Each structure stands twice: as structure tokens, then as C-alpha cells.
Image (spheres, grey):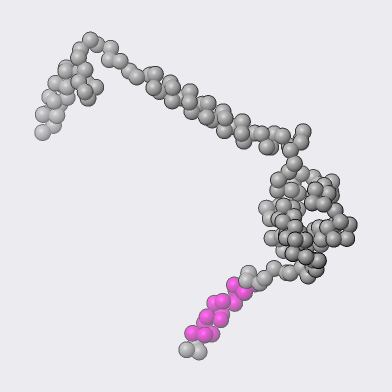
Amino acid sequence: MLRALFLAFFLWLPLAPSLQAAPIDALQFPDQASEERFHRLIEQIRCIKCQNTSIAGSNADLARDHRIKVYELMMERGMTDDEIKDWFLARYGDFVLYKPKVDERTWLLWGLPAVLIGLGLILLIVQLRKRSQSVTVPSSSAPVTPSGLSDAEQARLRALLKDDQ
């Protein structure tokens, strides 16, 4: 039993660093609404160092500094969410927000997916219409059976199948 415990401990040991919890910012909020607003806002701002993580989910020092900056801008300066986002936009550009504002620089980012979906639907409709209009009509005047083969082709097929047996 003791061996099993030692074995389990030594197998678990390499995993221990990855199981550490993220640091907790000790921030005080006057009410629940302010705290929810803070958490909602830090989920919308991208960590510049991690790039695919919000500052809420990142353990990077820069993300911690940004969380504290958001708290300061909210609590000490009394800025609105849009003013805080504009503050980050002025320093880091459109990339810092997960949902950039629609303006003359970002209209393509927002409009291109809709345009591509529309073009795809148009191409699909055109292809389906071409396919339905290109039903082949037999070139000979021989009667066609329900299988799509003429009587002569049916006879030839039967002869070929007899030869195989």
C-alpha cells in the first residue's frame, strides 16, 4: 500500500505545476453591479501578450496590469465602458478588443463574412439550376426503358452478363 502511494505521488509530481491556480487580484468593489461590470469588461479586452486570451483569463503580468488599469479607470476616474475601451484602443489599436467597433477601418472585417456567404449562396443556386437543366436526352430515336437504356443497349447488357456466367 505504501509503495502504491509513493508511486502515485511521484507520477503526480510532474503535473503539479500545471495544476496551480491563477493569481487572484484582490480588488474591492462597492457593489455587485460594479464587480459584474468589471468582469464583463475584462472579458472583452484581449491580452496583448497572449493574443488569444482575454485579460480576465490570462496569467501574464501585462494582463494583470491591464486588469488593475481597468479597475483604476472604472473606480478612481469613473470612466464608462466605452471610455475605457477607447483608452485601450488609443494605446494598442483595434486588436485589443474582441469585438472592434464598426468604422471606416473595420467595415471590411464585419461585412466580408456576409458578402462571402451571399456569394456562396448565389453560386450554389446557379450550380443547382445548371444541374437541373442539363438532363441528358438520348440522341437516338430508340425507345428508352425506365433504367435509361434503349432496347438495343438492354439486349447488349443481357448478352454481356450471360457471357460472364
Q: Nearer the viewer, residue 14 or 111?
A: 111
Residue 75's image quarter?
Answer: bottom right
19 magenta-colored: no
Query: Is 38 rendered above or below residue 112?
Result: below
6 magenta-colored: yes
Residue 144 x %, y %: 21, 17
Query: Is 121 rendered above or below residue 41?
Result: above
Give the quadrant of the C terminus: top left
Looking at the rendered structure, the number of numbered marks drawn on it comes to 0
Residue at image x 48%, y 23%? Answer: 126
Q: Nearer the viewer, residue 134 or 39?
A: 39
Residue at image x 50%, y 89%? Answer: 2
Residue 60 x %, y %: 74, 62
Q: Is residue 3 left or right of residue 84?
A: left
Q: Nearer the viewer, residue 18 or 53?
A: 53
Residue at image x 74%, y 38%? Answer: 102
Secondary structure, magenta segment, majority class: helix
Residue 49 x %, y %: 74, 55
Query: Is 90 rendered above or below residue 147?
Result: below
Quick check: can you spot residue 108?
yes
In magenta, the rendered stretch is: 4-17
Quick check: can you spot residue 50?
no
Q: Residue furthest bottom?
A: 2
Q: Is residue 24 left or right of residue 151?
A: right
Residue 155 x %, y %: 14, 21
Residue 159's image quarter?
Answer: top left
